[in-house]
Structure formats: structure tokens, C-alpha cells
Image (tube, rainbow, N blue to C red):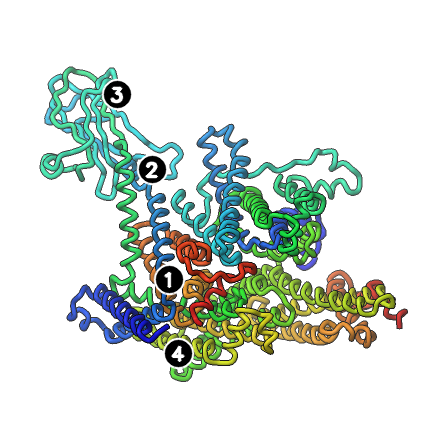
Amino acid sequence: MNWARRQALLLVGIIAGAAVTLFVTQTMFGGSVEKMTGTASWQNILLVNGLVGLCILLFVVELRRGAIRVLLTVIVALLLGFLVTFIFNLDEASRFERGEFRVQVLTEAEPVEHDDVDLRYNRARGGEFNKPNVVEPVSEVAWTFAGRSGDVVSLLAYAKNRRSPVDMLVELRDAAGLALASSTSASELQVDETFDDLVSSKDAVIEGYALPADGIYTLYARPEDISAATTYSEALNQSRLAFEALLLGPIERVNRWGVWIQDAITLILLGLSFAIVFRAQQFSLGAEGQLYFGALVSGIIALNSPHVPSILLIPFIILAASTAGFVYGLIPGALKAYLGANELVSTLMLNVIATRFFEMVLNFQLKPPTAGYVASDKFTANAVLPVIVEKTQVTIAVFILVVVVFLAWLLIRRTPLGYEIRIIGSNLRFADYGGVNSRRTIMLVMAISGIVAGLAGMHLANGIHRQLILNISFALAFEGVVVALLARLNVLVVPFTGLLYAYLRAGAQFMERDANVSFEVVRMIQAIIILLITAEALVSFFQARQKRADIDEAGHALTQAEDSDV
Amino acid sequence: MFENVIDGIFSAVFLAAILRVTTPILLPSLGALISEKAGVLNIGLEGMMLSSAFTGVIVSAYSQDWFGAEVGTSVGPWLGLLLGVCVSLLLSFVLALFHLDLKGDLFLSGIALNIFGSSATVAIMFELTGDRGNTSTLASLQMPFIQLPEFINDIPLVGGFVFGVFDNQSVMTWLAFIAVFVVAFFLYRMPIGMHLRAVGENPEAAASVGINVKRIRYMALLISGFFAGLGGIHMSMGYLQLFQRDMTNGRGFIALVTPSLGGGTPIGTMVASSIFGFFDALGIRMGSLEIPSQLPQSIPYFATVLALVIYALQRRISQRVSEMRTASGAGFDAVFWQAIQRISIMHMLLMMFAVIGVVTGGAILAAPNGFGGAEAALPAGLAIGAASIALFIMGLPFVSDIFRIQKRWRESAAVTIVSLGAYLSIFLSLFLDLPVALAIGLVASAAVWFVIGGRALVGGK
């Protein structure tokens, strides 16, 4: 690439990075400088946002045109996710058919004495329509009342309170069952002034009806039928709300921003771990087990050293967690390199073993005997990673991460071992032929990726949870696969994709909280992203000048990442 | 305490339990076998199982609304089976499409399908029931259970036992074991099965004789999806009567190894699946012991890793031996080398036990409170760990180089007999006095060594 184009690319990257940094900061503080400087540790927030911008710069510069593809993939997956959310929300309008209601016959006339009727003048009666999980839910009511000729009555059917979403229909029927009058709504005047009980215009009122004769009448009420237009507009509205929460939720407030950043740190570490090991064409999924061991070791050290000063303890914990990850990565590495045991299966099995081991130690050894649920004691303050942004769990892990990314880049791009890893990744036979000790390298690369996964465990234990809990990883490891793939196995791009993916995950939490759309929708989006990003033929459909490598062996998608680096 | 467990293991109830828990491993294993034979290992089995398990539950629950309670109860399970398998087929079609036509990576597309199966089931469950843990609020149905005719129970001697094992098994269990033979027939007796194996062995060669490689692979992936679907249905409509979040619990991954453990044959796959079923059932039964349940629960996973290792070693040794055979021609002593191979497998199995011993010792040391307190557990843990490490180190030279078994056969014999004798006598000491158990154990293991290959070594030298 010539000089001018490289400068132009750099410029685009800088502009994009600066724009995102500005946008995030502005949204967080609502655009006011006073509010920003009034927030605690705002300098550090700015620093982290600056790093976010740097990640975007790296993403643009490293992936070049590939960046467009990654963004397109994410956008397509998000659109599909929106479609799924829309489908899930098609029943959203049906809430208008549910809820507690009241009906009343209001009149100024004298009450009629009659024993065999359901309603009396001016006395409310109610129930709940279509209550969920009930064998025979109430879907309509027909209650009788006695009336005299000439009584002027108003029939009200309304939601019991603002929490009840039911949209009412009311009918007045005579003794023969013929409808005399009906209504599906209430005017603003009726809601605000005439009738105190009404909640909204969705309630139904028949106002001032003069009964034609003495006798028994029926008040018939049910939820109003929902039109197709209402169904679609409600579903669309709800999905829009959900995606607003997904896309803007994480940067609305500082504490939410903290959720995003702290999740991103774990994901970036896991993504680096996968990127390193996939680089050598080793399909090791052992990060989860290594993470558990890292968390366990750092947790045990933290629990047993309440008096060691933080400045000594934290580096020791970091060292121990990386060693644990290294050792647990060495096992499948050695099995693969020297015995040819399939690393995919062995790492999956070792993951389960590590999880069970973690559970056992936690359950029987670390849990205080009096504790009601399975968790260790809270760590003492000296063992917790120091927080750099108040009210969040954004810790010095940010700086550790910067160092780790730099070291990973050094390893892959600037060391003989990294060269061997790349050679093995592109062609194992060629590597052997060229004198690479491929066995040793394969073993080492799996162990090194374990170091990073062990650090992720340390971050979860000592940075986020500050104690050991069951399911500490919560299936995070597979998300690391997506992060690594989106970054096309480029360790300098992993920070960006980690941030992007953590953003979606954090957004999903707020989407679930604010809009009642299941968190799992985002995991479906994740599956779609993997499918789209690995489908090479989809790309060549759009790119005429696509180099066609041998499409033979599995793992073709991974070798493609090579292209973006050369 | 131990006696209860031992008694339990040798009972019809336990065998019946093995059959029940083997089924959801065996069915996807057959799928994995077929896909592996065609050279397109289906990683997405787990997601396919989950989605069919979920579909089955939902369809069977709602069919009672659709067709009325009476018709629904009889039709529901079968409709659930049909639609569940259809969903699984659909997913495997997506996998095939993305791998074979869109040139996506098989491994990663499979992972994507697993994530999709896991998340979509939970998301839809949440939409339908408001619960994201399980579908216990839905009145879902089970596949029918097959009752054996009473007269079998009256057959003298074996009748009661056979009846105890096979009575009241789900129809899916019967289907699974019948399917083993169907798959064997398909792979080895039908032309299309031979094409499938040819494609797996060497796609270029298969293509050159006019086999449509892509079509065969499509078919293999769809068949594997079909079996995964059946396995999922058994999980939620036989093994349990509801759908739980991620209820397959790694069975789809275990199914990926059983074919290689079973030597790549349907019968071998069945045996390998049954071994997993055995450990699964054992883990459940050992829950009555006063030890952390996590330890027996992880045995199948250890067994898988170790079995992978043994399989890999075994393959290497076979290769060595066959190379030697080619090199030495007619003078090759096949019987002798087969004996050596058998003894090396013996060494490996014994080392596998030693590794489990090391792990048990490690577990005791790591969480002594789970094993009756530090005072009792620590020495026991140390002893078990040290003894196991010693046995492991003793066996190592003979596994790493099989020529040592030939050259130093006396040491090899001693290691085999001592290790096997130790395990046997520990087992026997549950029933007998220690000296007696020790004596019987050593004699028995010597006999085993002699039968397996020792006589060739003793005679050959």
C-alpha cells in the first residue's frame, strides 16, 4: 500500500476513534462539561474513553476493508435480531386483553331491592381478565342488575389501576340478551372530570342511558378485540424500545458504562486467548477451564492473605493466576502435540473437569460453614484490584489489559515463536518441512493462551465479584470465540471487537430490564454473527476480487485472517 | 456404605438405569459416527439436541390444546417427535448449507448452532412460559414406555433379571439400540453407505469415480441431525418429562468422541456409549456415599480424556507394528506382536486408573472438608496420591516405548501384576479380609497377565 493511502487510512481511523470517544463521553454526561467535571474520577473516565477511541483506530488501521465487513456483519445480525424481537413481541398487544378490571352501574336513582342479581347501583365489582397460568381464565363477564323504567344509568368498565393494561368493551343488554348500547372507549372529559374511577381512554363508558322498562338488565364486559394494526404497531414500538435500550443503554449513566467496560475487559482477555491459539489452527476451547483455575488460584490466595500489602499481593496473584492458566493449558497442549489427541474434545472435557473441581473446592472448602448459599467470603480490600472509577468496578485491570495486548502483539508479530505460530497456522506441513519444532510450538501456544484465560479468571474473581461464586464465568468463554473471530484473529483488533461485543451484552441486560426482552436474543445474534463471519462464500459474492484459497480443510475461515496481516 | 453401592451396581435396576442414560448418548453418537465417516464431523449436535428436545416438549404440551385432551395425549408425543426431529434436520441443513455451499468453517458453524440452540430455546421458553429455567408449568408428555409381557418374568433363572432390565424402557431406548444395527447395515451393506465411507476416506478419489461428494455430505449431516433430534426427544420426553435450560449438558460433545473410542464402528460406538452410560449411572448411584458428588460426576470426562490418549497411543503403536510388519516381511511374528500390543493396552488402562487415583488424591487434598475433615482425609489423600503417582511412573516407560515391553518383559510383568493386583485387592477387600484379598488379587492379576500376552513373552524368549 502506498504512503498516501496509508496516511488516509490513519486519518480515517483517528477521526472515527475521536468521534466515538466524543460521542460516548457526551452521551454519558448529557453534553455538559460541568456535569462531567462534577463526576468523581472523571479524568479516568476520559482516559478509558480515550482508550476506546484508540481501539477503534487500531480496528480501522489493522483490518482496513475487513473492518467494513465486520461492521456489516454486526449490522445484519442486529437487523435479524430486531426481526426476532419483533416476532417475540407480536403478542405484546395481547396485554390489552389481560389485567384487573372493575365495572359499575352509576346512577342517582334509588337502588332497586332484588336478591337475585350480581350488581347493585353504585357498587363496583371486578375481577381479572385472562390471568396467566390459570386453568380457566376469565375472558368475559355478564353481570345482571335490576333497573326501573326511567333510571338514568352510566355503565363503566375500567382498568382497576394504572398497572392493569386491559382495554375494555362494555355493553348493556336487556333481559332477552339484546344489546341496547355499547362502548369501547371513554372521552378525555369523561376520564378527567365526569368519572373519578376511570384510568384512561382505554376504559369504556355508556353515559346517561335511560332504561326503557322495569326488569333485569345485563352488563356485559370483555377486553376489546385487538386489530392487526394495533398488534404490529405495539410489537414495533416495543422492539424499538428494546433496541434503544440495547444500543444506547450502556452509555446512559456512569454505572452502566462501568458494566460495559468491566465486561469488555474479561471478554478482551478471553478473545486474546482464543485469537492466540486459533492462530496456530488449534481449535482449543479450553479457555473456560483455564479461567476457572485462574479464578480458583487467585481466590485462594486472596482469602488466605488478609495482611499482605496490596502492592505485593496483587502482582503475586496475577503471577499465580497466569501460572494456573499456563499449566491447565499445557495439559491439552501436550496431549495434542505429543499424542495427537483431538484438542477440541480434550479441552471441552477438561473444561467440565475444571468446573466440577472449582465447585467442589468452593462448596466444601472455601464456603464459610454458616453461609446459606455457595460462595466464599468477600475478599479483603488488599486483595481486590484497585478501582479507578468510583461507583463502578472498572479497576487497574484496564492497565493490565493494555500491557497484555501489547505483549500478545509482541509475541505474535515480533518473536520467533510468534512466527512459528503463524507458519503452523497457515500450513503445518510446510512448518515441519521448514524446521519448525511444531510439537513444542503447538504445546506452548495452547499453554500461552491459557495464561491470558487465567488472567480473565483473576479479573472475574478479584476485580468484579470480589469473592468466589458458582458459575463465575457464566459461559463467557464461548463469547470469547466470537470476539476472536470478529477480530479475524488479529490481537490488535481484539480490543475493539471485545468492546463491541461487551457493549451488546451490556445493552442486552438493560434491554431485558427496561423492555422485558430476553437476554438470550443477543446470544442468538451472536450465533448469527459467527455463521455470517465464517461463511467465506458470502463475501466473495460481494467481492469480485477475492483470493480463492484451497477450500478443502476445515478451518478455512481462520487462515483467511492471515490475509489481513500480511 | 460401600457394600450398598456395590450391591446396587450388580442389579437389574442398575442395568436398566444404564440403558436409560446411555440412550441420549448413543443416539447422537450414531449421528456423529455417520457424519465423521463422511468427513464432516457434526459439532452442532448439542444445539440440535436442545432444539428438538424443546420442540418436542412444546408440541406435546400444546397438542392437548389443539386436539383436545384425549386425542392430544396419544398423538402429542409422536407429533412432538416428528416436529422435533424436523427442527433438528432444519438446523443440520443450515449447517450443511453454510459449510458445503457457503464455504463456512464446519467447526465454527457448529459452535454457532450450539449457541443458537441453547439461546433460542431459552428465549422462546421465556416468551411462552415466563420462566427461563425449565418448562415445568407446561403439561408436556412422554414417549410411551414399552411394557414386556408378564410371562418373561416367569422364565426360570434369567427371567426376572431380564424383565427387570428391559421392562418399562422408553420406546426411544429400544429405537436407539435397534438403530445401531440399522446404521451398521446402512454403512456396510448398502451402496450409498459405501459411497459415504469413500467420501470420508478420500473425497478426491470418490469424486473421481463419479460420487457426488457434496450431496453425500449433505446427506450425512442431515442423518446426523436426525439422530441428534431423536436423542433430544429422549432427553425431554423420556429421560425427563420437561425441558430444562441446556439440559443436554455436554452429551452432544461426548457423542463426538464415542465413535473414535468405538473404533469407528456402530457396535463399537454402542459399547463406548454404554461405558459413558455406566459412569453416568455410577455417578448418580455414588451420590449416596459421603463424598462430594462432583468427583463421580467428573469421572466420565476424565475417562474421555484418558480414552482419547489411549486411542491416540494405540493408533501410534498399531502404526509402528504394521510398519515393522512391512519391513520384516514373512519373518514377522504376528502372534508375538499382538501379545505385546495387548500388554501395552493393559499398561495404558492401568495408568488410566492411576491417573484417576492421582486426581482423587488431589481432590481430597484440595477439599478435605468434603471427605470427612482434614485429619482423616489428608493422610488418605496423600497416600492415594503418592501410590497412584508411583504406579503411574512405573507404567510410563512401557507406554512410551513398546519395545521396552519386549526387552524388559520381567519388569513389565511385575508392574502389570502389582498395579492390577493392587486395584483388584482394594476392590476385594470390601468383601474379604485384607490378606486374603491381597493374595487373590495378585494371583488373579498374574493369571490375567499370562492370558493376555504373558505366555507369548515367556514362551517367545
Q: Which mark is residue A131?
A: 2
What x and y, as percent, mark residue A64?
A: 36, 67
User: Comparing marks 3 and 1, which lies closer to the viewer?
Assistant: 1
Position in image of residue B229 (x %, y %): 55, 45
Residue at 18% x, 33% y: name it.
Answer: A185
Pointer 3 or 1: first along the chain:
3
Label 2 packing within 10 angstroms: few (<14), some (14-19), many (20+): some
Neighbour class for label 3 at 10 Å: few (<14), some, many (≥20)? few
> How many angstroms separate mark 3 from mark 2 (CA)?
28 Å
> Label 2 lies in what chain?
A
Residues A565 and A170: in front is: A565
Q: Upstream in the sequence, badge 2 or badge 4?
A: 2
Identify the mark nearer the N-term, 1 or 4: 4
Q: Which residue bears the numbered disc 3?
A: A116
- Image marks 3 and 1: residues in contact by CB distance under 8 Å: no
**Residue A216: quadrant of the picture:** top left
Residue type marked 1: Tyr
What amino acid is at disc 4?
Answer: Val
